[in-house]
Image (cartoon, coloured by chain):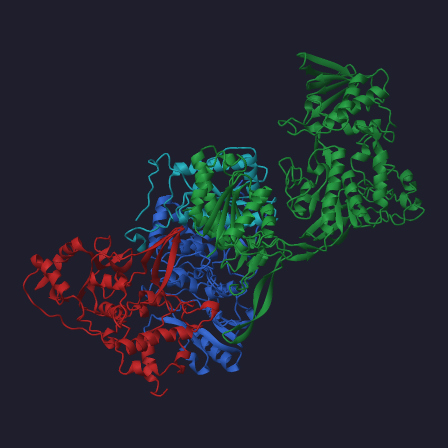
Chain colours: A green, B red, C cyan, D blue
């Protein structure tokens, strides 16, 4: 006979306020196999856990049911607690009396009945629990970082400095991401290139880091400690092992293309380095626009001009497969395509209505205008500049509902740069709020005000051209009057959205995305850099809009998590995996066909049946690969394969207990 | 005294006032003994029903004990209620089934009180057969189709009426109840016998010596191991005991089981003394024709032919009996 | 013996018992999130946590109706979001067939629902639970498939 | 009919004498003219017990499950339905093709012994010629298309839920749980059926409507996507329950939802529940 102990938590008033704890305790006493019931103000607290440990000894309990918050919250905590007693940590069931009972119901009597049902279900299930034991799997101490922006670079550097090999994959021809496009960074106004390019060079030269630019992740299988990743090295038609980066080919290449890096405000050649400080500082050929490769002409000048003979037009994509112990995803963001959403701001027909990144390129010394703020339309210096904030952000109807966090600060920076670089310029900033939630942020904003930036509280409703000027009509909600400003140039601070193609990366890594397509972290507050897939971590804006300090902080956090895994020789596996009863298994192979992790394989085994030695095909589970989803168990008609922790018998007991 | 056939319904209504009267009926296309009053066609003319009347005494699922457990106490209550029943239109082969079950459940030092209570409350009214199916062979098995000796009352079909012969107290009580309907008059029915004749002389003893004979090596393979033959056989009485739990309370019940099922003799650890269909079929035939006779000296096979008709792969006990005959005595 | 439940006289304060299988990574998380945001929904749904909606064996649904549940809800991640990659593709096929098969055997389709609810869709969880609970409250208690648990006269002997 | 019978006996004698097969599974006569049942001929002298007449109704493929490790090949007479049963067992990895020698016999349908009318399962049969065989006796017969494959199912679907429930409730009330339908079915090839595992607690042993419903629906669901529509379950049921209406409902839905599907015609087409398509019908949004 098993001796079950039931511990009902008040959770302060979170549960006790709605659920009648005394009644639940009373009812629990009469449930099958229950020999001891106790309630506690805070079961997850130190004294709370100690009370359970004492009760286990005093009442010789062997199964525990805890009525408290969601198992997703404190199941690990209570399992660790049980590990220090002589009860197996898996002889435990938790009834969710908070998130799914007291917090969501108001009627005290009905909520209490539901709480009693939930406890009865947990008591019924725990009766069928088995002791489970973890087993260990080897760890490949090599990390993969997807995305070569500042987040990816920082994570790679931290892991590499810890002594582990890292593969840094970037789909663009160079590391740097968005940060390297910026001119200055708030609040210290130090030059973005000066702090970002050294990191890129460090990453490029670090002995432990293998930089793989113009590459994309093609296929991921396996699990924490043993990810089998295939990377597609896109054809670059230039042999980087021989190329010295002398740049002759770039000069000679006849076909000109708009440069993505310069946000379309300058040109590049078909064979190009995105920007001078690119890492690796070696060109690649853009096959779509190269006259030889897209078949429009013979050309091949770069091949003839190249002193080292690095150009090879027959280059093809290569697939490189390797095993990794952990993966950090740092795929970053891009700016929302405001032109297709905001027709009222001209929908892109006015060349002088630009977005934040375009302004950064204008004001950047190595940008198309060598740092002079000149209007894209006629190259003149604009005397009056309007900056419009929250374009696409905080606008659930047309754009995105969320706030993109960083634009308030870089809008103030842009205003500061306009006033500093253009003498007696006028700068208007249309805003809803000014959010300066960072160290020295508020001081930076007040200095911009002192510089003379005019902050107008209200959205811009319309921008149209009138005799050479861009008329921005809006409203000043503080004075209640409509406002119209004639501007020479308008800068729209647009919303951040996830980088294109993030769906593919998420599906490959089996991680989910939230409503706005940002990658879903395991827990917004407690596990911001982890995902639900063990061994896969997040860093930077791919997890949600943030500024550079937070991005770098997350990058180092995910690196720490990776090093945590690599610090151990072996990893403990999840014991709640499938197990086959070979007596019942007829070898039909349905389960092997269903398993997403290829954890099940059919094997011939020797048996003695009615005195005759025979070999028979049965199903076997690889405990390292199995993640415990149970899809095979529901597909096995005789129930020969069962999922420990969620066995058929356990769930049937729960269903029966519920329907009493 | 005799009861005219036109008054049978009235007679049944009278009986139905005090007891559940089970009569042979076709209900939803299935011939079985159903309580008088269910929608369906009274079928006194058919030789024997698909489902025998054995479930009046030995239902397919019978609740035995009800129990309730709480932290301190546990109470168990035997489920004993069983109301009065009358089986009307019983054939001799069905009566033989009741005789065999009586021997098993009531004699040899152990009385099954679930069965005995039902048996005390049961009145059997047999009707003699006026024709036999080609698969009937009851007279070869020591059963007289014209007269069910151990029935409480025997009705003899004389064309338009039944001669009433009450034999026991219960029979006389029914006769007294039917007094207003009965008329004077006697008559005898022309005795009938089965077309299919089998020579059962000395067979049980011979069969007991043939456990290792190679007669068993053929004829079993077609069996699909289903429970049809045992569940429609009037004399099969094997049962399994199981429980149905409902939270803190539950019921223990017994239910029919079949020796033809593969897991009937499977033991803990997976050992099965009758691993293949050969052993199981041998066990069934031996039980019907040899073992039962050794213990209760009467055949467990009533010769009703139900299994011969309904076996999906036509495993035929009569052809087996003929084959046993051909085996030389020391074979 | 036919089982016609007169829809009209369902007594108003009868509370249905509804069972919901929720996948641990999405719907259960969505339900927790609904709790986090203090959303309110009817009390008569009890959630059984399963690692993946692919773990739910259609026989559990039959068992729930047999043991007296008035409605069953199976929830999981949106296809493509499954934490175990393909679990919910099998769930979809299994319950597309089982839903029709239950209906074919006489169960009112509103009594058995399957829904994809992600970890972020707390509102959708609340709305689904509220709708299913109100539908079933209108339908009244379910007698079909239900095991007639112990009757004095052993009615379930027949 | 008799020349096929002669050929069958000749082929059987040759196979047995040459030792290519250990024994031959065919049909033999019972006591009465309308009784034919499976027989197992080992001795070449006894091949004349093999018959081919109007009452050869039982499918034979499932008997291979009693001899899973034969020393020699097993000879089996296969009509259209038996051959699909062989494919079914091979695809479920319960039988190896090289363990059986298939004697294909085109079949134009058999008679129901009780009514002497064409048997229901043969009237509804869409594949009279064997789909796989080692030798073929006689020439293929003309296939009969089955436009009304799901007519009975549609009739039931037209009823109201309560009518349908009562229809099936009466059916399940009659079931005596003899498991003949399970034991004869080539798709029901588990080593240990879930009904025999009381400790896990899927199914009670008591015979009442609820337990019978659970068994009936679970079995139909288990074999739904594998059923070769041989109609044996309905034929062997002693209570005459319309079991094919359950299996055909599953097949009808599989056809509508996942594309035209007939089980057992080859060993490649996968049963519907064993795999998925990402663009399956979506109803649960």
User: Is residue A456 shown left or right of residue A126?
Assistant: right
- Residue A491 shows in this picture: yes
Relative to B250, residue B134 above or below: below
Picture quadrant of residue B264:
bottom left
Relative to A125, residue A192 above or below: above
User: Is residue C125 shown left or right of residue A191?
Assistant: left
Q: Where is residue B269 drawn, in percent x and y? A: 48, 68
Q: Where is residue B258 drawn, in percent x and y? A: 37, 67
Picture quadrant of residue A394:
top right
Task: Name the foreground residue: B74 vs A650.
Answer: B74
The residue drawn where x is 34% and y is 73% is B316
The residue drawn where x is 66% and y is 54% is A572
Q: Residue furthest right?
A: A307
Task: Name the foreground residue: A371 vs D254.
Answer: A371
Q: Residue furthest front?
A: A58
Q: Where is residue A153 drawn, in percent x and y? A: 79, 41
- Residue D252 shows in this picture: no
User: Is residue A190 shown left or right of residue B105?
Assistant: right
Q: Where is residue A233 drawn, in percent x and y? A: 78, 48
Relative to A634, residue A39 above or below: above
């Amino acid at each position: 006979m098993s001796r079950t102990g039931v511990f009902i938590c008040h959770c302060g008033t979170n549960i006790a306020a709605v659920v009648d704890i005394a009644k639940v305790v009373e009812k629990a006493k009469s449930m099958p196999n229950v020999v001891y019931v106790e309630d506690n103000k805070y079961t997850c607290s130190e004294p709370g856990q100690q009370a359970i440990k004492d009760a286990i000894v005093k009442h010789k309990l062997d199964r525990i049911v805890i009525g408290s918050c969601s198992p997703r919250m404190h199941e690990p905590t209570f399992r660790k607690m049980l590990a220090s007693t002589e009860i197996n940590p898996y002889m435990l069931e938790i009834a969710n009396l908070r998130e799914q009972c007291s917090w969501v119901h108001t009627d005290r009597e009905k909520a209490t009945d539901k709480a009693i049902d939930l406890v009865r279900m947990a008591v019924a299930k725990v009766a069928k629990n088995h002791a489970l034991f973890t087993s260990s799997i080897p760890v490949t101490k090599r990390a993969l970082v997807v995305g070569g922006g500042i987040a990816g670079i920082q994570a790679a550097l931290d892991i590499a400095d810890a002594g582990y090999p890292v593969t840094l994959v970037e789909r663009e021809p160079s590391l740097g991401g968005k940060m390297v496009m910026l001119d200055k960074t708030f609040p210290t106004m130090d030059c973005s290139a000066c702090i970002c390019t050294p990191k890129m060079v460090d990453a490029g030269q670090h002995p432990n880091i293998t930089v793989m630019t113009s590459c994309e992740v093609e296929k991921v299988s396996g699990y924490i400690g043993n990810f089998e990743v295939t990377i597609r090295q896109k054809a670059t038609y230039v042999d980087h092992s021989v190329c010295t980066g002398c740049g002759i080919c770039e000069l000679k290449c006849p076909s000109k293309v708009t440069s993505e890096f310069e946000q379309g405000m300058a040109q590049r050649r078909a064979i190009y380095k995105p920007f001078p400080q690119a890492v690796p500082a070696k060109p690649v050929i853009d096959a779509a626009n190269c006259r030889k490769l897209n078949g429009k002409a013979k050309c091949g000048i770069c091949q003839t001009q190249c002193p080292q003979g690095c150009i090879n037009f027959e280059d093809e994509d290569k697939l490189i497969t390797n095993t990794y112990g952990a993966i950090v995803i740092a795929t970053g963001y891009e700016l929302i395509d405001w032109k297709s959403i905001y027709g009222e701001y001209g929908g892109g027909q006015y060349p002088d209505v630009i977005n934040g990144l375009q302004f950064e390129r204008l004001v950047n010394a190595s940008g198309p205008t060598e740092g002079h703020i000149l209007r894209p339309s006629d190259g003149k210096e604009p005397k009056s500049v309007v900056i419009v904030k929250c374009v696409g952000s905080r606008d659930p109807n047309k754009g995105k509902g969320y706030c993109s966090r960083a634009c308030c600060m870089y809008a103030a920076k842009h205003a500061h740069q306009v006033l500093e670089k253009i003498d007696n310029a006028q700068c208007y900033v249309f805003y809803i709020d000014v959010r300066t939630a960072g160290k020295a942020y508020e001081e930076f904003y007040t200095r911009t005000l002192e510089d003379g930036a005019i902050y107008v509280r209200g959205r811009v409703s319309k921008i149209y051209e009138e005799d050479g000027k861009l008329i921005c009509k809006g409203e000043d909600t503080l004075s209640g009057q409509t406002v119209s400003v004639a501007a020479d140039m308008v800068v729209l601070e647009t919303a951040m959205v996830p980088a294109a193609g993030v769906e593919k990366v998420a599906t490959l890594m089996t991680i989910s995305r939230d409503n706005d397509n940002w990658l879903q972290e395991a827990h917004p507050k407690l596990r911001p850099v982890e995902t639900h897939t063990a061994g896969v971590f997040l860093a930077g804006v791919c997890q949600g809009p943030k500024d550079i300090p937070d991005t770098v902080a997350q990058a180092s956090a995910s690196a720490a998590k990776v090093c945590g895994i690599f610090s151990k020789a072996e990893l403990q596996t999840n014991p709640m995996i499938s197990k086959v009863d070979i007596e019942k298994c007829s070898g039909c192979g349905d389960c092997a066909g269903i398993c997403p992790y290829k954890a099940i394989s059919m094997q011939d085994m020797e048996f003695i049946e009615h005195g005759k030695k025979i070999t028979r095909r049965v199903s076997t589970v690889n405990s390292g690969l199995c993640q415990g989803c149970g899809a095979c168990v529901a597909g096995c008609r005789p129930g020969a394969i069962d999922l420990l922790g969620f066995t058929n018998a356990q769930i049937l007991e729960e269903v029966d207990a519920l329907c009493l | 005294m005799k009861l005219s056939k036109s008054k049978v319904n009235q007679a049944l209504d009278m009986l139905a006032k005090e007891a559940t009267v089970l009569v042979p009926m076709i209900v939803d296309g299935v011939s079985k003994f159903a309580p008088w009053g269910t929608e369906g066609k009274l079928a006194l003319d058919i030789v024997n029903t698909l489902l025998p009347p054995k479930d009046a005494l030995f239902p397919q699922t019978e609740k035995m004990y009800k129990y309730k457990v709480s932290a301190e106490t546990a109470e168990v209550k035997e489920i004993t209620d069983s109301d009065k029943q009358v089986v009307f239109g019983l054939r001799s082969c069905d009566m033989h089934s009741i005789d065999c079950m009586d021997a098993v459940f009531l004699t040899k030092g152990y009385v099954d009180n679930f069965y005995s209570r039902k048996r005390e409350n049961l009145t059997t009214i047999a009707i003699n057969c006026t024709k036999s199916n080609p698969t009937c062979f009851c007279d070869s098995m020591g059963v007289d189709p014209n007269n069910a000796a151990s029935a409480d009352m025997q009705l003899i079909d004389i064309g338009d009426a039944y001669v009433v012969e009450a034999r026991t107290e219960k029979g006389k009580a029914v006769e007294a109840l039917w007094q207003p309907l009965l008329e004077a008059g006697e008559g005898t029915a022309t005795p009938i016998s089965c077309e299919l004749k089998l020579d059962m002389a000395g067979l049980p003893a011979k069969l007991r010596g043939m456990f290792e004979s190679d007669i068993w090596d053929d004829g079993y393979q077609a069996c699909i191991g289903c429970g049809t033959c045992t569940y429609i056989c009037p004399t099969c009485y094997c049962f399994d005991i199981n429980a149905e739990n409902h939270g803190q309370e539950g019921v223990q019940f017994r239910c029919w089981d079949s020796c033809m099922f593969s897991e009937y003799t499977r033991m803990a650890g997976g050992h099965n003394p009758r691993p293949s269909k050969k052993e199981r079929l041998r066990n069934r035939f031996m039980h019907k024709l040899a073992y039962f006779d050794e213990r209760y000296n009467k055949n467990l096979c009533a010769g009703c032919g139900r299994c011969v008709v309904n076996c999906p792969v036509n495993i035929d006990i009569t052809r087996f009996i003929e084959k046993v005959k051909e085996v030389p005595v020391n074979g | 013996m036919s089982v016609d439940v007169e829809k009209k006289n369902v007594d108003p304060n009868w509370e249905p018992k509804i069972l919901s299988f929720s996948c641990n990574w999405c719907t259960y998380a969505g339900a927790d999130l609904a709790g986090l945001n203090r959303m309110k929904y009817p009390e008569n749904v009890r959630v059984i946590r399963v690692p993946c909606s692919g773990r739910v064996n259609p026989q559990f649904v039959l068992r729930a109706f047999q043991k007296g549940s008035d409605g069953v809800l199976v929830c999981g991640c949106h296809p493509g979001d499954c934490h175990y990659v393909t679990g919910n593709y099998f769930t979809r096929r299994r319950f597309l067939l089982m839903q029709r098969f239950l209906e074919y055997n006489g169960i009112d389709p509103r009594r058995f629902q399957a829904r994809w609810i992600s970890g972020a869709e707390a509102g959708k969880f609340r709305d689904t639970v509220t709708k299913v609970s109100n539908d079933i409250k209108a339908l009244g208690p379910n007698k079909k498939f239900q095991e007639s648990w112990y009757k004095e006269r052993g009615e379930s002997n027949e | 009919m008799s020349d096929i019978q002669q050929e069958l006996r000749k082929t059987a004698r040759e196979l047995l004498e040459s030792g290519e097969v250990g024994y031959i599974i065919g049909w033999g006569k019972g006591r009465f003219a309308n009784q034919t049942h499976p027989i197992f001929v080992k001795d070449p002298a006894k091949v004349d017990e093999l018959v081919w007449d109007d009452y050869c109704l039982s499918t034979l493929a499932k008997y291979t499950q009693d001899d899973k490790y034969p020393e020699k090949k097993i000879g089996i007479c296969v009509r259209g339905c038996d051959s699909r049963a062989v494919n079914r067992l091979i695809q479920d990895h319960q039988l190896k093709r090289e363990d059986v020698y298939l004697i294909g016999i085109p079949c134009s349908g058999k008679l129901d012994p009780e009514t002497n009318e064409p048997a229901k399962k043969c009237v509804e049969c869409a594949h009279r010629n064997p789909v796989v065989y080692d030798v073929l006796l006689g020439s293929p017969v003309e296939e009969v298309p089955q436009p009304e494959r799901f007519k009975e199912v549609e009739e039931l679907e037209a009823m109201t839920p309560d009518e349908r429930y009562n229809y099936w409730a009466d059916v399940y009330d009659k079931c005596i749980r003899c498991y003949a339908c399970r034991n004869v079915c080539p798709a029901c090839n588990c080593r240990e059926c879930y009904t025999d595992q009381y400790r896990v607690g899927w199914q009670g042993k008591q015979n009442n409507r609820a337990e019978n419903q659970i068994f009936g629906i679970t079995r139909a669901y288990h074999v739904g996507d594998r059923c070769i529509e041989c109609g044996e379950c309905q034929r062997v049921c002693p209570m005459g329950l319309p079991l094919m209406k359950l299996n055909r409902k599953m097949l009808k839905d599989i056809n509508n939802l996942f594309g035209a599907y007939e089980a057992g015609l080859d060993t490649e087409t996968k049963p519907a529940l064993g795999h998925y398509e990402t663009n399956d019908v979506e109803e649960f949004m």
